[in-house]
Image (cartoon, coloured by chain):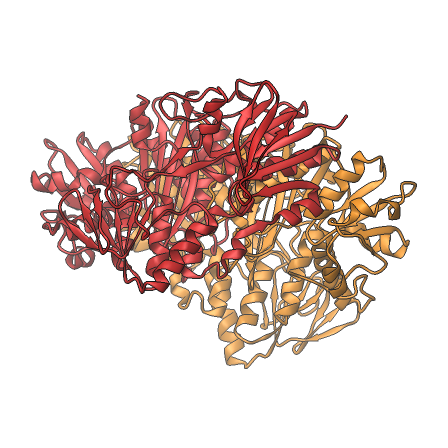
Chain colours: A red, B orange
Amino acid sequence: MSKKVVIVGGVAGGASVAARVRRLDEKAEIVMFEKGPYVSFSNCCLPFHISGDVENSQDLVLMNPDQFDKQYNIDARVYNEVVAINREAKSVTVKNIQTGETYEEAYDILFLSPGARALRPLSIPGIMSPHVFVMKTVPDVENLMTYIEKEGVKDTVVVGGGYIGLEVAENLKYVGYNVTLVEAQDQVMATLDYDMVQMVNREMLEKGLNLVLNDSVKEIKEDRVILASGKEIPAQAVVMAIGVSPENELAKQAGLEVAEQTGAIKVNHHYLTNDPYIYAVGDAIETTCFFTGKKTQLTLAGPAQRQARAAADHAYGRTYRNTGVIGSSSVKIFDLNAANTGFNERQCQAHGIDYDFAYIIPKDKVGLMPDSENLFFKLIFAVPSGQILGAQAVGKGNVDKRIDVVATAIMMNANLEDLKELELTYSPHFSTAKDVVNHAALVALNILNGDFKKVPVTKVRELVENNEMIIDAREENEYATSHIKGAVNIPLSQFRDRLSEIPKDRPVYIHCRSSQRSYNMVRALGQLGYDHVYNMDGSFLGVSEYEYFNDVRLDRDPIVTDYNFN
Amino acid sequence: MSKKVVIVGGVAGGASVAARVRRLDEKAEIVMFEKGPYVSFSNCCLPFHISGDVENSQDLVLMNPDQFDKQYNIDARVYNEVVAINREAKSVTVKNIQTGETYEEAYDILFLSPGARALRPLSIPGIMSPHVFVMKTVPDVENLMTYIEKEGVKDTVVVGGGYIGLEVAENLKYVGYNVTLVEAQDQVMATLDYDMVQMVNREMLEKGLNLVLNDSVKEIKEDRVILASGKEIPAQAVVMAIGVSPENELAKQAGLEVAEQTGAIKVNHHYLTNDPYIYAVGDAIETTCFFTGKKTQLTLAGPAQRQARAAADHAYGRTYRNTGVIGSSSVKIFDLNAANTGFNERQCQAHGIDYDFAYIIPKDKVGLMPDSENLFFKLIFAVPSGQILGAQAVGKGNVDKRIDVVATAIMMNANLEDLKELELTYSPHFSTAKDVVNHAALVALNILNGDFKKVPVTKVRELVENNEMIIDAREENEYATSHIKGAVNIPLSQFRDRLSEIPKDRPVYIHCRSSQRSYNMVRALGQLGYDHVYNMDGSFLGVSEYEYFNDVRLDRDPIVTDYNFN
């Protein structure tokens, strides 16, 4: 007897369940319900329709019901909303939105993939105005574009500096709108640490995007947004991208367990809810953290697809090794790429994990190659084990490659010794013989082993303000072009003859351009009886990148005579 | 008392030893000998000076003796050739090439990094002519460029289809020379399998490079090269890039052990030779294969740098975990990128390893993105363990990323289950939610678990010639544009109503464009009692790519009505 499989919700979770069930069971009867007009679309690509990178909004639709029927023998019903689950009867109550008619549909196995809803805090006056949009579905982006073109919108405000907010802002800017991005925290992209996000800030600043931090929306008027600070931003269209909340009403009504704090649907190892005939996958569920084993939430397409497959497999007797999630993501912001995996510093601190990190700024490929670029890379590891906890990379080149390598290493429980030995591909157009990841692991091992001490880029302003002893190990012509205020220029090529100028009785902080030369000086001094020598992480390049955005934003005195980003 | 460290040879091995020793020991006396004019240069970048990608040949020089002296307090002596090692006396005999003078230099520890020499078989008449060049040093590329510009060379022959040969050929072609690449084997790039190299062949063909396979050089005349086949290729300049041989004379003369067959210097776990005061690193030494534990050779810059560091560390009491080498490399050929790691099919066969492979052709990023490209990907795994043995990738996009992920997985002893669960970064500009690597692992697991059967792209011509039953699962309009000769068109969207047309009593081979649709049909038929159904690896796209080059080269009848590369 063939199974009847019912799926609530399409997109990454539901559609993947449907396709997998069909491959496992040619005879299953499969019905997929979607309350909206599209059962399978690329929600990650929605922002790219704004700029025309995805020219036609219908291209965002990956599969229509007719294709599901003919190619997979799957009954995909759009505009059909599941309004109740009748667990005793093993059926769902469905409302046909177009006819208003309500009907029952029986199931042997039910898969829930309801997704998450974009937050719209009703406490903000004006939040439901016709010029306020979210970005979750194809109609959302169509409505936004129709509106701003028809109404002749010039000024836009995007609220929320997560991936969606950034991509919406970037794509609006690409096609010529004035864009202000408002973020309540002191930084966009919570996946990156504060130091790593400053390069992203600089890119947005240079591309003419108005970035407002530490401020939130108090009221939305017809022609402007009023912020908590009292600041008023002209805006004839507003996009809310402050986050999502699990669509859990159906599950709650049916008595399925949801997490108290987050509202996410609780599932077991195989994505089964507390009802043995109901699975749940995707943005609406609770997942497990790879590092801590604690419950967490992650609204990403990759994990949703894996959950879908695992749930379908389990329904057909195949077990699954649930490793938990580490959190890997990437984003392009104008000409800059950023990616991260695992824990950042904040997450380590929140979980009480003892950690340290290496921060390096090598070239992404051999420096001789015409298109080589600086790559900002941060590797976070556990102390004292050296276990890899996370990494962040920002640059114009291939940052996602390095992060994918670290993600792989993390999931294979690698430590720094493993990472330094990785034999990665090399040719001058793609990388360097000692790739960024190897290089970071070597620096990290030196830190872990106590071979040298370092001061992070976040502390340099304080050093300058306290008149600490800073040595600039670059050549004289480099120092002349631009340097840290108060720094003494003792080039690596001269220091052995100028040791008398370097005090032994107070801390000395050494930098060069990107820390290669300063590191060699630090190691040498350490062996010459200098006990208080620190390498400055990121050196002059790192300091310039770290300080620039806030110097401009807060109109404060730079700690360098001139920025240098090369 | 400070140590005296002597290093023979610079570049990746020797210069890395020198820098590492300095960091470990500020007081060591370090002398580095180099018989040529440059102690540290980027040999991997030499070919890029031909096209002007590296405009000035002096830019290839990374560090000069003055910089070594001033920055690292290292005594780097160019034009000084070490002609003998006096092991008893712990000294080397050095000949100053410029003055002819010979002198002794004592050492406490000696590091050999002599590298490898480009092969020039003296059995080929004309091999030592002034218009025949190799590509190992800065003077080599300078001599070539001076010659071809001064002599008004139009036609060039590059002998050898390894990385250097390909890059020299590509760069000569870029600046307008006629280029013939002659390779004795039936394919270039021995790191790739025959199926994966065909895309590289097509790229070279389309860029106007004349590729001659299965032929070797019999004689080099002033104006032409005569091949073993009798073919004559006009050439006023010839570059020999048929491989290298370890520079082992010094080691042999000093009674250090070298491998009988390869001549490579034998070293232990810490790169120590059979003399406890002499280390050897780089292209001249024997290394250990990660997979088999057997001795092997690998002339790559990355491993050389790691060996250098490990050897220096060991001289200072730090031990090393020697994992052996897996062999990872990458190359850009015109607009195409290729990369590989671990074992290919030939290596598995040579070592008697039971293996199978998945071959897929997904997009390298979300298909909606304007610059998405086909990515040809082959994943090789052990049977029955599912251990990852190797991978090869070819495409216009980010192929090295996927190979680096697999390289990491290999070195962490990953199997297919690990690979399918990897949580890699995703955003539409960089990848797909189920990345290429995850996708390949899923297909491979299905193969390993016997969920479906497949026929490789290498066998399709035979199927066509034997009038086997081939089903084209694409839509009718796709079939009408181009198809495999003799294939029956039964679209995935129709097959459930046309089962009567599919025989159960003979093998059926199914393909679509890239195997997504055919795979679903194969899975369905398998459950409907069809026991002899095979998915065609790579499908129409794979067949077009596999057949095209040899169809043109051998002027043979295509097995498709028209090629389709999209």
Q: Residue at x 53, y 46 (%)?
A: B432
Q: Quadrant of residue B483?
A: bottom right
Q: Is residue B63 visible?
A: no
Apparent side of residue B261 relative to residue A178 in the rendered image (left or right): right
Q: Extreme bottom residue here?
A: B152
A420 to the left or right of B194: left
* Residue A496, image quadrant: top left
Q: Toward the viewer: A303 or A272?
A: A272
Residue A318 percent across, percent down from the top left: 66, 24
Q: Taking B314 as reference, is B75 above or below it?
A: below
Q: Position of residue A465 (x, y in %)?
A: 8, 41
Q: Quadrant of residue B217?
A: bottom right
Image quadrant in which the C terminus of chain B is located? bottom right
- Which residue occupies the foreground of this view, A29 or A243? A29
Whether residue A439 sits left or right of residue B48 in the image: it is left
Where is residue A543 shown, x and y percent of the image?
21, 46
Give the residue at the far right of this rendering: B505
Q: How many marks?
A: 0
The spot of residue B498 in percent (x, y) is: 83, 48
Q: Residue at x 33, y 53 (%)?
A: A169
Q: Quadrant of the N terminus of chain B?
A: top left
- In the displayed structure image, the side of residue A250 where residue B62 appears, left or right: left
Mark yes or no: residue B379 visible: yes
Q: Residue at x 67, y 43 (%)?
A: B344
Residue in the foreground of this view, choosing between A409 and A473: A409
